[in-house]
Image: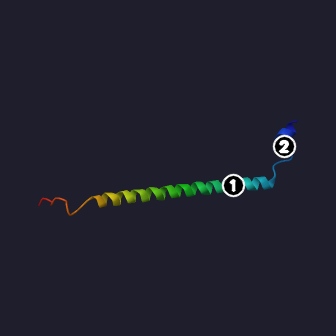
Amino acid sequence: MAKALLGYVGGSDPRLLAEMRRLQQRVQDLESELVRIQAENDALTAAASHDRIMESVDAHQAEPALT
């Protein structure tokens, strides 16, 4: 009964272990890519925000500086 629940006794299948390692590496690669893309997105968002602030300043309507 225990063999039926746990599978055959004879060790792990090397193909299964290789596939598991490949999938774990793929997950790590995707997590790294996600972190890189999030950092790039944050930088682009900050740059776009800075550009909007600079565009909202109208130099023609600004008051002259005191001298």
Category of crowding for the residue at label 2, using alpha-carbon neighbours closer than 10 angstroms: few (below 14), some (14–19), many (at least 20):
few
Q: Amino acid at mark 1?
A: Leu
Residue farthest left in this picture: 67
Q: Residue 59 placed where, x, y %?
A: 22, 62
Q: Residue at x 69, y 54 (%)?
A: 23
N-terminal of the pair, mark 2 or mark 1, is 2
Q: Residue at x 80, y 54 (%)?
A: 14
In this orientation, which residue lies closer to the viewer: 5 or 57?
Answer: 57
Kindly indicate whether the residue at mark 1 contacts the one at mark 2 (C-beta within 8 angstroms): no
Residue 64 is labelled as none
Q: Residue at x 62, y 54 (%)?
A: 28
Picture quadrant where residue 1 is located: top right
Q: Residue 54 placed where, x, y %?
A: 30, 60
Label 2 – label 1 distance at C-alpha: 22 Å
Q: Amino acid at mark 2?
A: Gly
Q: Residue at x 60, y 56 (%)?
A: 30
- The secondary element bearing badge 2 is classed as loop
Q: Which residue is mark 1?
A: 23
Q: Residue 63 placed where, x, y %?
A: 16, 58
